[in-house]
Amino acid sequence: MGVPPAVLAELRAAAAAAGVRRLAIVGGAVRDGLLHQHYGWSLSGKTDWDWVVEGDVLRLAVELSQRCGVKRVTELQEYETFGTVALRLDGLPLDLAMARRETYLMPGQNPTVKPGSLESDLVRRDFTINAMAQDLISGNLIDPYHGQRDLAAGRLVFLSDRSVSDDPTRVVRAARYAARLGFVLAPEARQQVIDTVRRWPWSWHWYDTPEYAPPTLASRMRMELDRLLEKEPWREALDLLEDWQAMSLLDPVLQGDLDRARRLRWAQRLKIPLLPAWLAAASIPEAVARRLCCPGQQQQWLRQLKLLKEWLSSGGAPSVDASPAVWTAALEDQNWMPETVALMVCLKPRQWKPLLRWWGRWRRLRAPKTAQDLMAAGWLSGPGLGTELRRLRLELLGRSR
């Protein structure tokens, strides 16, 4: 699975000394290792190894530290609430987690977690292809849900008939894996997605009352979307979500959004986050962002976006062919945040070209003289100095196109 042999040897020895019954690599590292071994898939440079311990996690970490010494084992931290210990062994990050079992008291809420076995830890995972484990003590590959069979078939199968209703973020995760691996949803998995979307209570009339969306679910949904947009083939993944009619988990207006790919390509070009650029086409973008617990700054961009759109369409903005100085003065007098202007460029209004030029060039232009230059020439510190610097800057902009 790509773990250095010296690290594996130390883990096995420490596990035996600590009385650990089972120590296993689980999840994506096992899946990707099998894809590489049997189907020739290339392994990415960085692998996230999930380690599950059936036994005393802290005792294992202490034993490992005593065996290897403080030069080899560093940054040891215990997270008692989560039953995990994080450390580095020979510089390799290791997160050792207690084997656990989960129960969902209410759909969409965080599960209740208790100590469990390796088998109970595997059953809480999302897909059969992620519910395999390589036991480092016995050497056995543990595959209770036929993940190898589904890998060979190129399909995504949920572990239970309640997987999606318990945690709807698994819909987004399914799109991520399907896009990355080129897999398809098994028919029963697709039906789970359809049924959950049909029943899910985030309907359009709740936009202005985000407290109805469970905050834990909202945060997890946003994190899954961020991963999708930042690390996955997002165009394919979003097309899958649309095909599954799953956009209504966020906003029904995003279903059938024909400009989505173009808007997100522009966001990439302008180096702004993709999620607010996607949500910019929602019926009430700020409300959707607020419900998803997006960062406050992104919510502010979307709040201003509505006002900027109104300003551009109301006749208050300069004409498209107005000079750089006129556009710069008008935009900056309104105090639009630069990212708000960039989001508007992504929406491609009639005035998108001067907005793009302001974002990319005009706003970065500085006055030919500094405040120190003016003060050396006799100007006094105060509002007048700022006004003169602005006049010089706009004068310079007036000579450029």
Image: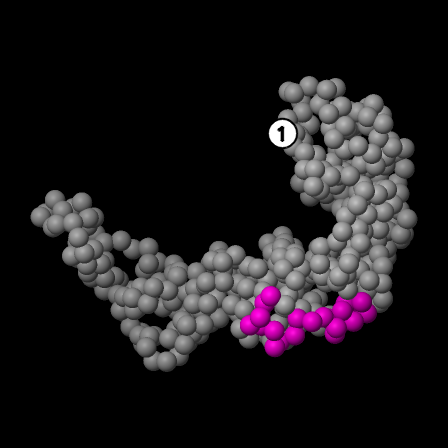
Numbered disc 1: secondary structure: strand
Residue sitting at 69 percent across and 19 percent down? 69
Q: Which residues are magenta?
A: 190-211
Where is residue 192 drawn, in percent x and y? 80, 67
Residue 236 lies in quadrant = bottom right
Q: Which residue is mark 1?
A: 75
**Quarter of the C terminus within the rendering:** bottom left
**Left or right of 320, for residue 301:** right
The one nearer the camera, 107 or 257, is 107
Q: What main secondary structure does the magenta stretch of the protein show?
A: helix
Amino acid bearing label 1: Glu
Residue 75 lies in quadrant = top right
The one nearer the camera, 235 or 169, is 169
Which coloring applies here? one colour
* Position above or below: 377 against 139: below
* Position above or below: 66 against 148: above
**Left or right of 349, for residue 139:** right
* Position above or below: 65 against 293: above
Residue sitting at 70 percent across and 34 percent down? 85
Residue sitting at 81 percent across and 42 percent down? 115
Where is residue 393 drawn, in percent x and y? 23, 58
Residue sitting at 39 percent across and 61 percent down? 337
**Quarter of the N terminus within the rendering:** top right
